[in-house]
Image (tube, helix red, strand yellow):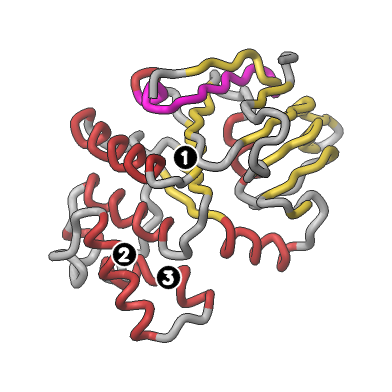
Amino acid sequence: MSAATATTAGAGGPQPVIRLEDVRKIYHMGTQQVAALGGVSLTVPPGSFWAVMGPSGSGKSTLLNLLGCLDRPSSGRYWLDGHDVSELDDDALSEMRLSHLGFIFQSFNLIPQLTVQENIELPLYYLGWDAERSAARAAELAGLVGLQERLRHRPSELSGGQQQRVAIARALANNAETILADEPTGNLDSATGDQIMHLLCDLNRQGKTIIMVTHEPDIAEFARHRLHLRDGLIERFEEGRT
């Protein structure tokens, strides 16, 4: 493996859920160009669990934004579930996000005016699900994350760990195979953070692909594959215990 490449997919294996080929991202700041990613190639097999690590400015957030179809590479190719999304327009990128990905954020990103049920249902609204089917799906997912008794509560009535569980349920609403998590335990105490990580591990054992950005080595230990970025390149790749 080169400094800019990581892969765990063998020849003849299943189609990767994510494949990057020499992806670069350059930001223009006035007359200066800042290379956030300097040529990253990455293959993510289905059902794998990755932790992305690195110092501030290493390219972690840029990589996650590209994987989440929130931004486009300046050059290189990106395939998501076999679809080349490198040059899609905004509408097409939005459709890919909605159909293929689930997101978990450090700050939960719940809508405070909505109940737990309504927050979980939000992706389904954009997918055009009817109210009865959406409500049933929200109840199912609330049960999965241990919040079946909290469907009518609003985020302000929940603990931080409970809010993150709502965010995980929302990420699962569209039945996406790939979950992107940005510092999912960053706003939680260590005991609650461990609970959230065990929940993510359970989802991974059920077949979900998880890619998580974290700066905490103990949280990264939950992931089977660990990717270290530095200066916009993959510095090294490690196999974990999970």
Quarter location, residue 75? top right
The residue tagged 2 is 112
**Amino acid type, mark 3:** Leu
Quarter location, residue 20? top right
Secondary structure under badge 3? helix
Q: Position of residue 222 (x, y in %)?
A: 37, 26
Does residue 35 appear left or right of residue 158 in this picture?
A: right
Question: Badge 2: how crowded within 10 Å, few (<14), some, or many (20+)?
Answer: few
Residue shown at 43% from the left, 48% from the top: 104
Does residue 227 appear left or right of residue 21 in this picture?
A: left
- Front label number (2 vs 3): 3
User: Is residue 227 rendered magenta in the image?
Assistant: yes
Q: Which residue sits furthest left?
A: 149
Q: Which quadrant does the N terminus fall into?
A: top right
Residue shown at 34% from the left, 58% from the top: 169
Q: Which quadrant does the C terminus fall into?
A: top left
**Amino acid type, mark 1:** Asp
* Label disc, if present, on residue 122 of the rendered structure: 3
> What span is colored magenta in the figure?
219-232
Q: CA distance from mark 1 to mark 2?
A: 20 Å
User: Is residue 152 rendered magenta in the image?
Assistant: no
Q: Which of the pair 185/202 is nearer the observer? A: 202
Does residue 1 appear left or right of residue 226 in this picture?
A: right
Q: Position of residue 121 (x, y in %)?
A: 38, 71
